[in-house]
DNA sequence: ACTGATGCGTC
DNA sequence: GTCGGAC
DNA sequence: GTCCGACGACGCATCAGT
């Protein structure tokens, strides 16, 4: 199969009338000679109509459907489904609900009403209501859950409508902490005291130990952490047992002095890590504290302020419950663990909607509609959750347990795993209070979207540990900043930040860094965590350079080098070893620290050819590129991507790879990150050997003049590369110091240049609702090229970047006049690409792209290059409106085909196969 | 055993 | 991957 | 300059549904 796509890439048939390809154009317009006419929209157009909403009425659409090429049944099916998935909120009504509930949100009174709302859909039976609390709790876990809860539709409480506002501009509208709607308040009061009374849970213990299992194993493989693991383990189990008692005592005695969880406010002026916390020492951190922090962060736009907020939360955690720092960090970043362990939730939006719907008595369509209205599922979930009451409130969520639960989710695999996951999620969801629901759902979606991510988190961690040190001379001090000038304190923070960031970049594993930080303090961190073969480090990235001139302005008088920018996949190769390289333990990591070792058995097998005898251990920075070993040609990225990704066996590798090595980050146990590139490169060349077609050093040239750079750029493009990487050779700027500057290199690509790269004029034929930041307006559009021969608009790509906010506002408004009920019958597209709103073909936009690709999902130039693949754009972005062009004057399918074939990478392939592409014309 | 839907990683 | 917004 | 989150095409891996 991968073979198929590969061959199809290689063997582009230039023939005009390859058998079935060019079809006998349906309509009479068919012009025989037009081999170039495309083969109209087979499946899509035809099927699309049949499944379209019933109410559609557009007259012209019913044209020659009969004459369309027959569409596979399967695609018809798909159509229906997809169609349904994107049904707009407006059309909820015509969804297949088969029940009353579907249409109008039912107002729901929250207090009184008797227990249940049984969703007809789920056929819940009222009788179940009589179950005892305990039973219903059990049921939750089994996914029979929903009986115990009342639910309602959103939009119930009129007061609740802060959300629309939020969605419009989340940042500008601060969520007033105190004035949470009364309803929400009403949910919580009793919950807090209740904490673990009825909970004789084996679950805390169980979940803790369980999740510790794998981690323990992992950690034990790292000597450096062994000691910590032990102590941590003990502590945590003890704590878990003690928790129960302590908590109750605490609640009885201290409760009045505690900040109510729902009012936790990390933004309080003069925040006191203990007095302003909403839990006590040793107590597990309530998830609500974190959720409140995230809320506050989300409502903030200034990064330093966000960092302040988060750091205050961290200070409390450090002071009260340090063992919860690690899970807190993971939850903030939406990570389950270090990337190279490969943990995945396997759950995303679609399944989440099912989970939320099932839990709150809503249909999938309702949930989808609510999510669309609010621009985000998280907010919709929070609303839905708020409208729901339970007979028996589940125990409140704790940071540590939630993180453990998420890891458990990731561990579920195999048959019926999705349902298991959904029911587990539902059990978590019903325990959510206030904004917990929103952030839980966002976590599960994989994006927190609060405007704070890794860099700021590290900064917050630095601030927190500087101010409330967990270890070191000031350990136990709650606020080091007191009694220090703010300048002095700032210097301390900066120092901590640099140490922490540097350590993290060279050892991006919170499992290692956080415990060491807690135990030894920031200053000691480098002694406990350092660059180690076997642990991937953060790679150096590059900034785009808009022109050759920019390179010279950036590097002033410094010497720099240019390297070809190969179009492959980043590969960080680690070979451990003390006396001799232990090749059997070599690993290959991706740009994002994923473990790709089993993807490249062929590469690993030939490692010996690369390492000279002087090497015992090393870390290499490389690009793995698909390579045609027969014709000695670099192949396009699209070919590389067809390689098997897991557990490939060297024998079955079909796409060969040449690895282009361009940097050396560690040699014989010594980190080279603080060596200049010139030195690193010298060592690279001294200690490693090229091997044609297998291991090669990236082609490099130390350019001094603009002309030279320009020529080298052109050369690289002719050599099937994307452009150049430009790097300083000497001095600090030449260090591999990600913490100081992660994008220290420049990349120069043709398509960045004015007049370079491909530019296309495409017609807007549809629009998608924006999400998150773009909620409330269009966030993306479907573009098409015009095919005069078939009188069709063929989908070319979606586009969602290059717009200013102003552009989006403008287009959202202006395009309203072109909205049509249903796609024209002369639109050709793939069902899965169907936009939320169809538009009459009127507007033409200029877009830019890096490449044109053969596409399974788009229809441009369909049949011209491949029988059933169209052409699409790689990295498409909006450039400007072409007011001067009418839709019919857009770039044509034929032009697209020519552009595709004109690409260097394609031409190279052609010549390699001795096909003269001039034949095509 | 097969297919389509869904997730997730690459760029 | 590209891009724009906020700082 | 940095950081963040909108959004893109594509292909493999995995699981639900048949």
Image: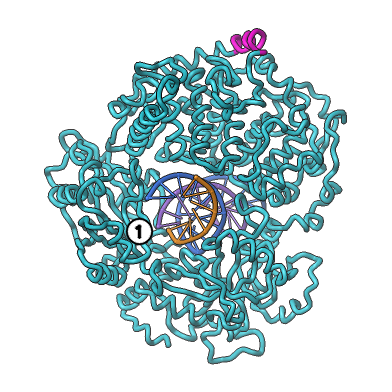
Chain colours: A cyan, B purple, C orange, D blue
**Can residue A270 be spotted in the picture?**
yes
The reply, left or right, for residue A765 in relation to residue A490 is: right
Q: Nearer the viewer, residue A625 or A742?
A: A742
- Decide: is A407 above or below D15: above
**Can residue A654 be spotted in the picture?**
no
Q: Nearer the viewer, residue A128 or A542?
A: A542
A380 is within the stretch colored magenta? no
Q: What kind of element bears circle 1? A: loop
The residue located at (17%, 48%) in the rendering is A679
Quadrant of the image containing the C terminus of chain A = bottom left
Give the labeled residue for mark 1.
Answer: A568
Expressed as whole percent of the image width and height from the top left, the position of residue A210 reads 50, 25
Q: Place residue A288 in its image quadrant.
A: top right
The residue located at (44%, 66%) in the rendering is A4
The residue located at (32%, 77%) in the rendering is A913
Q: Nearer the viewer, residue A326 or A886?
A: A886
**Disc 1 crowd, CA 10 A, few/some/many (<14, 14-19, 20+):** many
- The chain holding disc 1 is A
- Decide: is A142 above or below A41: above
A245 is within the stretch colored magenta? yes
Expressed as whole percent of the image width and height from the top left, the position of residue A311 reads 49, 29
The residue located at (50%, 72%) in the rendering is A871
Segment tinted magenta in the rendering: A244-256
Quadrant of the image containing the N terminus of chain A = bottom left
The reply, left or right, for residue A114 in relation to residue A411 is: right
The reply, left or right, for residue A259 in relation to residue A501 is: right
Examine the residues drawn in magenta and state their main secondary structure. helix
Expressed as whole percent of the image width and height from the top left, the position of residue A803 reads 55, 62
Q: Place residue A633 in its image quadrant.
A: bottom left
Q: Place residue A355 in its image quadrant.
A: top right
Expressed as whole percent of the image width and height from the top left, the position of residue A750 reads 36, 69
Count of marks overlaid on the render:
1
């Amino acid at each position: 199969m991968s073979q198929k796509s590969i061959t199809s890439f290689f063997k582009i048939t230039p023939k005009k009338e390859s058998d079935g390809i060019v079809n006998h154009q349906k309509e009479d317009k068919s012009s025989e000679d037009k081999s170039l006419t495309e083969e109209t929209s087979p499946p899509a157009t035809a099927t699309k109509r049949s499944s379209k909403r019933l109410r559609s009425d557009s007259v012209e659409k019913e044209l020659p459907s009969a004459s369309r090429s027959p569409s596979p049944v399967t695609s018809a099916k798909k159509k229906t489904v997809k169609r349904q998935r994107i049904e707009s909120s407006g059309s909820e009504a015509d969804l297949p609900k088969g029940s009353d509930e579907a249409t109008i949100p039912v107002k729901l009174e929250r207090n009184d009403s008797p227990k249940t709302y049984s969703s007809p859909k789920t056929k819940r039976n009222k009788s179940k209501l009589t179950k005892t609390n305990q039973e219903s709790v059990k049921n939750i876990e089994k996914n029979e859950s929903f009986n115990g809860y009342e639910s309602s539709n959103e939009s119930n409480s009129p007061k609740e409508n802060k959300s629309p506002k939020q969605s419009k501009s989340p940042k500008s509208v601060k969520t007033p902490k105190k004035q949470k709607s009364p309803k929400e308040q009403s949910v919580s009061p009793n919950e807090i005291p209740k904490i673990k009374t009825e909970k004789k849970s084996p679950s805390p213990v169980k979940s803790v130990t369980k999740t510790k299992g794998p981690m323990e194993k992992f950690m034990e493989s790292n000597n450096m952490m062994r000691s910590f693991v032990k102590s941590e383990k003990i502590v945590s189990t003890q704590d878990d047992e003690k928790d129960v008692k302590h908590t109750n005592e605490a609640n009885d005695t201290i409760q009045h002095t505690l900040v109510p969880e729902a009012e936790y406010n990390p933004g309080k002026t003069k925040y006191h890590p203990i007095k302003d916390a909403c839990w006590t020492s040793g107590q597990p951190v309530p998830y609500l504290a974190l959720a409140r922090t995230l809320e506050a962060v989300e409502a903030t736009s200034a990064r330093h302020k966000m960092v302040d907020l988060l750091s205050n939360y961290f200070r409390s955690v450090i002071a009260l419950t340090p063992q919860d720092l690690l899970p807190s960090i993971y939850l903030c970043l939406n990570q389950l663990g270090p990337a190279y362990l490969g943990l995945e939730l396997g759950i995303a939006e679609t399944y989440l909607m099912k989970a939320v719907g099932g839990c709150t008595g809503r249909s999938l369509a309702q949930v989808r509609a609510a999510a669309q209205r609010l621009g985000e599922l998280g907010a919709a979930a929070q609303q839905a959750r708020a409208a729901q009451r339970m007979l028996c409130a589940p125990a409140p969520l704790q940071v540590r347990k939630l993180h453990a639960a998420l890891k458990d989710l990731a561990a579920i695999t195999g048959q019926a795993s999705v349902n298991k996951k959904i029911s587990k999620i539902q059990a978590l969801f019903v325990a959510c209070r206030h904004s917990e629901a929103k952030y839980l759902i966002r976590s599960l979606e994989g994006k927190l979207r609060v405007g704070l991510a890794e860099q700021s988190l590290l900064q917050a961690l630095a601030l927190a540990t500087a101010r409330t040190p967990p270890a070191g001379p000031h350990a136990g001090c709650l606020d080091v900043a007191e009694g220090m000038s703010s300048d002095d304190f700032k210097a301390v923070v900066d120092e901590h930040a640099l140490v922490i960031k540097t350590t993290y970049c060279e050892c991006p594993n919170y499992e290692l860094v956080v415990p060491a930080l807690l135990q030894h303090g920031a200053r000691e961190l480098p002694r406990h965590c350092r660059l180690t073969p076997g642990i991937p480090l953060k790679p150096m990235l590059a900034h785009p350079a808009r022109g050759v001139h920019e390179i010279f302005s950036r590097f002033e008088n410094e010497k720099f080098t240019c390297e070809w920018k190969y179009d492959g996949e980043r590969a960080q190769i680690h070979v451990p070893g003390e006396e001799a390289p232990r090749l059997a333990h070599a690993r290959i990591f991706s740009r994002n620290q994923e473990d790709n070792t089993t993807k490249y058995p062929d590469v690993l097998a030939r490692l010996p050819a690369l390492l000279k005898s002087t090497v015992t251990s090393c870390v290499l920075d490389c690009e793995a590129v698909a390579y045609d070993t027969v014709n000695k040609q670099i192949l396009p990225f699209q070919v590389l991507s067809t390689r098997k990704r897991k557990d490939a066996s060297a024998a079955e590798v079909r796409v060969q790879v040449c690895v282009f090595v361009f940097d050396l980050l560690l040699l014989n146990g010594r980190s080279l990150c603080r060596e200049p590139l010139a030195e690193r490169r010298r060592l690279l060349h001294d200690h490693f050997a090229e091997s044609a077609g297998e291991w090669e050093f990236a082609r490099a040239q130390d350019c001094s003049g603009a002309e030279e750079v320009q020529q080298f750029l052109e050369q690289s493009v002719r050599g099937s590369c994307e452009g150049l990487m430009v790097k300083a050779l000497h001095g600090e700027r030449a260090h591999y110091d990600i913490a100081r500057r992660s994008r220290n290199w420049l990349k120069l690509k043709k398509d960045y240049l004015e007049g370079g790269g491909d530019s296309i004029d495409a017609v807007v034929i549809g629009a998608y609702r924006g999400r998150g930041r773009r909620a409330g307006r269009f966030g993306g559009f479907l573009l098409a090229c015009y095919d005069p021969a078939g009188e069709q608009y063929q989908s070319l790509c979606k586009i969602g970047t290059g717009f200013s906010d102003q552009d989006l506002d403008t287009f959202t408004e202006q395009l309203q006049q072109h909205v049509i009920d249903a796609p024209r019958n002369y639109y050709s597209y793939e069902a899965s690409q169907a936009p939320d709103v169809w538009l009459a073909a009127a507007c033409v936009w200029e877009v830019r792209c890096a490449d044109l690709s053969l596409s399974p999902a788009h229809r441009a130039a369909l049949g011209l290059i491949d029988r059933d693949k169209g052409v699409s754009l790689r990295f498409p972005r909006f450039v400007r409106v072409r007011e001067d062009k009418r839709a019919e004057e857009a770039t044509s399918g034929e032009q697209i085909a020519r552009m595709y074939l004109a690409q260097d990478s394609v031409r190279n392939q052609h010549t390699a196969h001795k096909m003269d592409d001039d034949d095509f014309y």
